[in-house]
Image: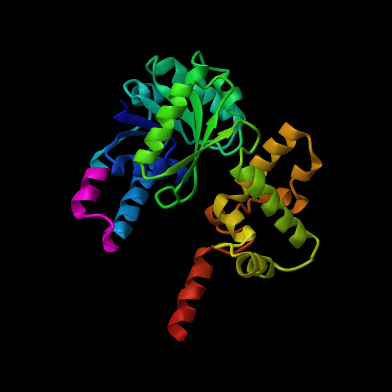
Amino acid sequence: MITTIAVIGAGTMGNGIAHVFAQNGFKVHLIDISKEVLEKGTSTISKNLDRMLVKNVITEDDKTKTLENITCYTSIKEGVSKVELVIEAATENVELKLSIFKELDTHSKENTILATNTSSISITQIASVTKRPDKVIGMHFMNPVPIMKLVEIIRGYSTSDGVTKTVMEISEKLGKIPTEVNDYPGFVANRILMPMINEAIETLYNNVAGVSEIDTVMKLGMAHPMGPLQLADFIGLDVCLSILNVMYNGFKNPKYAPCPLLVNMVMAGKTGVKSGEGFYDYSESRRAEKVAAQFAQ
């Protein structure tokens, strides 16, 4: 029975995953090499719980118990030694993930399940650096994790039926809807989503229409809640580029080749919301302008 889990990485996805597990009664070890990132991550969880509190989704006692269920660590060795499930949510970088999984394999218990929140990287490749490939699996949560229902469950070549069943059941305990998919570059979600985002960027690059016009067509014409360019900003343009590169290298198909505009924006440091600028402006000055405009109305 799984009662204690570890989450590697306290960034956007990591703190979201920690949040939903802690809120559903699991003991969570949140691990990151940076104390500052851990503090920011737990602060984000607290703020998100406050939003739920205002909406009467949870009680003050629920918030207190959720936060009490989270313990922070800066050491992987200490953080994973006594858990039954580890979920890695580090940056979408192959070499980094392989390095982390080697360490997880060394320091976690023999029967601990090792999961990755990767959005595109091969589960089989990640499992190959461990001595337990049957216990390595993908758990691809969607952002924002506390709200989005889907979890893509990706089986590697050697992932056992028992591990898959356990992870599916745990996802359901979180109130999520797990969907099992096979281990191919991009899986299902990003194999479909990223070419659409890339094509939207190509459309802008070819001067067919502007940013807001492209997003408006997709929102009003295709009933998407968010346009593809705005969504790319929220995902992170660097993450989009990384996923497209994984698919391009995996399939050797030019349809997955990243648009030059995307490549240039990432090289220029314009990665979306997290950098303050992508296809839209998220800077503090822009926020101040919006607030001023609201008061002027």
Q: Where's residue 111, x and y in %?
A: 39, 17
Quadrant in the picture for residue 39: top left
The residue lying at 72 percent from left, 48 percent from top is 263
Q: Where's residue 246, x and y in %?
A: 68, 36
263 left or right of 234 in image = right
Magenta: predominant secondary structure element?
helix
For the magenta stretch, what is the residue range?
Answer: 53-66
Residues 50 and 297: in front is 50
The residue lying at 40 percent from left, 28 percent from top is 166
- Quadrant for the N terminus, please: top left
Q: Is residue 39 magenta?
A: no
Q: Is residue 251 visible?
A: yes
Q: Where's residue 10, x and y in %?
A: 42, 40
Q: Is residue 31 visible?
A: no
53 left or right of 185 in image = left
The residue lying at 32 percent from left, 27 percent from top is 2
Quadrant in the picture for residue 52: bottom left
In this picture, is 239 found above or below 246? Answer: below
In this rendering, the count of numbered labels is 0
Residues 12 and 156: in front is 156
253 left or right of 171 in image = right
Residues 90 and 277: in front is 90
Q: Where's residue 231, x and y in %?
A: 58, 56
